[in-house]
């Protein structure tokens, strides 16, 4: 059997960490077995669903590299199909019209709570023989079996049994005729040939109801895997204060998609003590049945650590594409300056995020507005002016503007003045970067180029002269 998985987000918000992990698990299962991955947008909640959320979900999936084979399908475009299935269930007496008022249902629920019973519909309209009340638009309820049990053979949790007597006749169509979630998801999974459903364990209680509807339609249910929720470091349900923000916000904060995917796959799954997984390794090693049953805690520091590993290990040309996005957001024109890949190579060891890297990269493409005051106070004193003057002359005479040649000239300038290298290199660093921190000075000079380097040393000399 060819596997077919799906990711079915509701566009009532953005793509968050929990949804992204579900999408990743579903994508990996399909790709590992050469199957099909479907994207479905469950947008029947018309009051809360927005086009903006749809676009954010699609953009988040694309940024993570979770490409889909079919879709995106939209439930709002399948309303005639849902109506057809509802009518079929009515015609086959597998569903019925319920005329109970909201007041009656509320009173019933209160009675059941008072009696310490599980609140559920009592089936009053299940076999209604009297004429229905006038002027009442009924809901449609599924006629759930009252005998036997449903056993969910969950790929993560193992077999979970539910007694049919505990499952009430759920509503599959509202009084305005619109279908409910448990109906639409069943029809979609059946029509689209989904063979494996991976979703959060908050859906586990829906699963026996959905299996009963599928069986009523003569459809073999798919396999199910309910993954545990993600918690904050304090053990409480993940929320915005823990980092449960839009996936795209992680892009804005300077994370690479590889780092986020790697972090997500490790939330509930492991392979020995390995922490860093390439995409090929995920595809080869991941199996949904190996996911832990216990909830996982979200650790921002671990994600940041992973991001650093990827900034240092991935191809600089690839990282340069992501860095370009951040520099554009800062309004930095990179057309005139060093190659971005060379800048990535220079900055990757000292950058935690692409935001850090973009800020550090600005000096290679635009002039800094002001010097760091502490760096000036510490480094532009004593023989700094004379040292900068000598190194300016030495660099100006360099026949080739290459790191090795530039390094030799900085060293020679220090030796000629009988100074330690730091007494020349550090004022030079402040002169060309505006701060006391930069990549190795020879690399910094090479990336800046001859004209920009010499002009910045002259600017620093003017400042020193003005201060003295």
Image: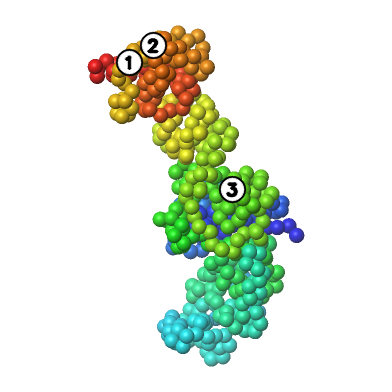
Distance between the alpha carbons at the discs numbered 2 and 1: 9 Å
Kindly indicate whether the residue at mark 1 contacts the one at mark 2 (C-beta within 8 angstroms): yes
- Residue 366 placement, left or right of 72: left
Name above or below for residue 184 compared with residue 106: above
**Residue sitting at 37 percent across and 28 percent down?**
435
Q: Earlier in the sequence, mark 1 or mark 3?
A: 3
**Residue on which the image places disc 1:** 383
Q: Quadrant of the N terminus?
A: bottom right
Name above or below for residue 263 compared with residue 128: above
Name above or below for residue 361 compared with residue 295: above
Q: Quadrant of the C terminus?
A: top left
- Residue 263 placement, left or right of 234: right
**Residue sitting at 60 percent across and 83 percent down?**
165
Q: What label does residue 417 carry, if any? A: 2
**Residue sitting at 41 percent across and 27 percent down?**
363
- Residue 36 placement, left or right of 200: right
- Residue 205 placement, left or right of 438: right
Q: Earlier in the sequence, mark 2 or mark 1?
A: 1
Residue 4 point in image, percent of width and height: 68, 58
37 and 82: which is toward the camera: 37
At mark 1, the secondary structure is: loop
**Residue on which the image places disc 3:** 275
């Amino acid at each position: 059997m060819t596997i077919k998985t799906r990711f079915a987000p509701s566009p009532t918000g953005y793509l968050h960490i929990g949804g992204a992990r579900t999408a990743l698990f579903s994508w990996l299962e399909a790709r590992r077995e050469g199957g099909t991955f479907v994207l479905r947008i469950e947008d029947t909640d018309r009051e809360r669903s927005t086009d903006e959320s749809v676009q954010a979900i699609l953009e988040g999936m694309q940024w993570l590299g979770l490409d889909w084979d079919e879709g995106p399908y939209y439930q709002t475009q399948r309303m005639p199909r849902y109506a057809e299935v509802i009518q079929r269930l009515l015609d086959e007496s597998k569903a019925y019209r319920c005329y109970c008022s909201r007041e009656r249902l509320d009173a019933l629920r209160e009675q059941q709570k008072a009696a310490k019973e599980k609140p559920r519909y009592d089936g009053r309209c299940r076999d209604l023989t009297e004429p229905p009340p006038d002027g009442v638009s009924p809901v449609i309820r599924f006629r759930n079996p009252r005998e036997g049990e449903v056993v969910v053979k969950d790929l993560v949790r193992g077999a979970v049994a539910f007694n049919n007597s505990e499952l009430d006749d759920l509503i599959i169509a509202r009084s305005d005729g619109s279908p409910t979630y448990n109906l639409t998801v069943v029809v979609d999974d059946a029509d689209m040939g989904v063979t494996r459903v991976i979703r959060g364990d908050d859906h586990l209680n829906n699963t026996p109801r959905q299996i009963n509807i599928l069986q009523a339609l003569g459809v073999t249910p798919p396999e199910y895997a309910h993954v545990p929720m993600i918690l904050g470091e304090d053990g409480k349900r993940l929320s915005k204060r823990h980092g449960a923000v839009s996936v795209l916000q992680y892009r804005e904060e300077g994370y690479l998609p590889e780092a986020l995917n790697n972090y997500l796959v490790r939330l509930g799954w492991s392979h020995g003590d390995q922490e860093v997984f390439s995409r090929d390794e995920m595809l080869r090693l991941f199996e949904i049945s190996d996911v832990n049953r216990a909830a996982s805690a979200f650790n921002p520091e671990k994600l940041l650590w992973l991001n650093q590993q990827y900034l240092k290990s991935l191809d600089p040309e690839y990282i340069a594409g992501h860095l370009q996005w951040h520099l554009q957001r800062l309004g930095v024109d990179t057309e005139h300056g060093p190659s971005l890949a060379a800048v990535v190579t220079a900055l990757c060891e000292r950058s935690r995020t692409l935001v850090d890297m973009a800020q550090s990269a600005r000096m290679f493409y635009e002039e800094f507005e002001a010097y760091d005051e502490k760096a000036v106070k510490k480094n532009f004193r004593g023989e700094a002016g004379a040292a900068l003057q000598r190194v300016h002359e030495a660099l100006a005479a360099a026949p080739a503007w290459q790191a090795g040649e530039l390094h030799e000239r900085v060293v020679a300038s220090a030796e000629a003045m009988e100074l330690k290298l730091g007494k020349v290199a550090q004022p030079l660093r402040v002169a060309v970067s505006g701060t006391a921190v930069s990549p190795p000075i020879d690399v910094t000079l090479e990336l800046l180029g001859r004209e920009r380097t010499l002009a910045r040393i002259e600017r620093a000399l003017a400042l020193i002269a003005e201060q003295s």
